[in-house]
Image (cartoon, helix red, strand yellow):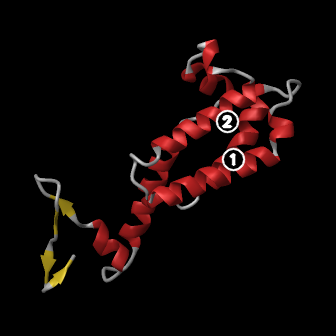
Amino acid sequence: MDQEVRHRIQAGWNNWRSASGVLCDKRVLLKFKGKFHRTVARPAMLYGTETTSMRKTEKMDVAEMRMLRWMLGVTKEGEIRNEYIRGSTKVVEISKKIQEGRVRWHGHLLRREEHCVGRHRWKWKCGVEGRREDQERDGMIV
């Protein structure tokens, strides 16, 4: 899973670098830079992240924040808060977008047929010790 998250981050950086001429131009409005970032770099990072754990996506939040700071020409020494940068570019945290994607994916699973493998995997429950407890129905693990 770590390798997949690193690959997604690298894909986002590759797209960001290809568009850095626009994103780093001081004459371009912040609103447009944020919109450009949301349509170029973010989809490359979000692709296939519906099944990644939320702890792994923290790295994606850090990478996106580095992109936004670089885009605005702000360093960490400037002590400008992340909320201000996100507010000025109108970019929501990528972890929230991943969570929205996970909810949407869950809806797709619920609409699938009852015998679908993905739907069975989603119904696993975690016990008190944090271990998976399989639910059994008609002799099959659900």
Say whether residue 136 is left or right of residue 94.
left
In which quarter of the view is residue 28 placed?
top right
Could you tell me residue 95's position as x and y percent?
48, 42
In which quarter of the view is residue 138 placed?
bottom left
Could you tell me residue 137's position as x and y percent?
14, 80
Could you tell me residue 26's position as x and y percent?
85, 24
Say whether residue 123 is left or right of residue 47.
left
Q: Quadrant of the C terminus?
A: bottom left
Q: Nearer the viewer, residue 110 or 127?
A: 127
Q: Nearer the viewer, residue 111 or 38?
A: 38
Could you tell me residue 40's position as x and y percent?
73, 48
In which quarter of the view is residue 52 placed?
bottom left
Task: Determine the residue positioned at 76% across, 41% down.
Answer: 36
Residue reaching furthest to the right? 27
Q: Quadrant of the N terminus?
A: bottom left
SS for callout 1 = helix
| Marks 1 & 2, CB-CB < 8 Å contact | yes
Disc 1 crowd, CA 10 A, few/some/many (<14, 14-19, 20+): many
Task: Please tell me how many numbered marks the rendered image carries.
Answer: 2
SS for callout 2 = helix
Kindly identify the amino acid type of the residue bearing the numbered disc 2.
Met
Say whether residue 22 is left or right of residue 31.
right
The numbered disc on residue 67 is: 2
Kindly identify the amino acid type of the residue bearing the numbered disc 1.
Trp
Q: Nearer the viewer, residue 24 or 87?
A: 24
**For marks 1 and 2 on the same chain, the one whose residue lies earlier in the sequence:** 1
Task: Determine the residue positioned at 39% across, 61% down.
Answer: 106
Q: What residue is pinned by disc 1?
A: 13
Residue 91 visible, this angle = no
Residue 10 visible, this angle = yes
Q: CA distance from mark 1 to mark 2?
A: 8 Å
